[in-house]
Amino acid sequence: MAKKITDENGNTYVQKKPFYKRIWFWILAIIVIAVIGGSMGGDKAKKVSSENSNKSSSKISNETFKVGDTVKADGVTLKLNKIDFNDGSSISTPDSGKTYVIVNVTITNVNKNKVSYNPLDFKLDDKGNQTALTDIVMDDKGNKITNDDLKYGDLSKGASVTGSLIGQATKDNKLKLIYTGSLFSNNEKITFNLN
């Protein structure tokens, strides 16, 4: 509250607080600091390692990765372990002109409290046609060709999950695995070349 001062002639003056002692100044300062901190914060995705390269971590912009690369962003790593192709069996046959594409990935929660994962967060890109990797393939005896399908769930800090995803594509086309899910808080798109 402003302080009233009366001088020797009887005139009354109001002495105002300096601006830095006013509440609006501190509210504005907190908002500005929060905006600046928010724009500077956030862990950008980085390539952690590669089986075929000894490069150190590099920032991702629109980089495309390859089999064996591990990508880290926001306390989570995603690694494309391997890719296999399968022509099917008498029980499971792919669509005409296509083959089954089997990708194996590992997701690791490096330092978040909890991370959710879902196989529907992955897409198989066949020359721009993006499809889900939800096929189930059986061999001639009626057994699944993979027993490690990536399901959905949550990872505690330090935990990891490895699983396979199966889709269909034309093997000779340029194929990509695209991750567009919610592992990373800034929803970055991670792309791996498959051939």
Image (cartoon, helix red, strand yellow):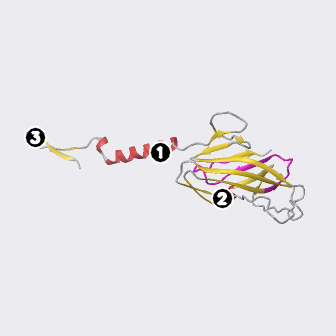
Q: Does 4 appear in magenta?
A: no
Which of the marked residues, 2 or 3, is nearer the chain's N terminus? Answer: 3
Residue 150 in which image quadrant: bottom right
For badge 3, the amino acid type reads Asn
Nearest the viewer among 30 and 117 is: 117
For the residues bearing labels 3 and 1, Cβ distance under 8 angstroms: no
Q: Is residue 124 left or right of residue 9?
A: right
- Tell me where the magenta segment starts and ends, as one range: 167-189
Kindly report the distance in space between the C-alpha atoms of the residues bearing marks 2 and 3. 80 Å
Residue located at (81% from left, 64% from top): 143
Q: Secondary structure at mark 2?
A: loop
Q: Which residue in the structure is indicated by mark 3?
A: 9
Q: Quadrant of the C terminus?
A: top right
Which amino acid type corresponds to the residue marked 1 in the rendered image? Val
Question: Within the magenta stretch, is there residue 170?
Answer: yes
Foreground of the two, 35 or 25: 35
Which of the two marks, 3 or 1, is nearer to us in this view? 1
Residue appearing at x 65%, y 48% in the figure:
78
Q: Is residue 60 visible?
A: no
Query: Which marked residue is nearer to the observer: mark 1 or mark 2?
Result: 2
The secondary element bearing badge 1 is classed as helix
Q: Position of residue 108 (x, y in %)?
A: 61, 50
Q: Which SS type dominates the magenta stretch?
A: loop
Q: Where residue 10 sits in the image (x, y, percent)?
A: 11, 43
What residue would you read off at disc 2? 118
Residue 15 is drawn in which quadrant?
A: top left
Q: Which residue is mark 1?
A: 35
The three-letter amino acid code for the residue at tag 2 is Asn
Image: 102 above or below 40 = below
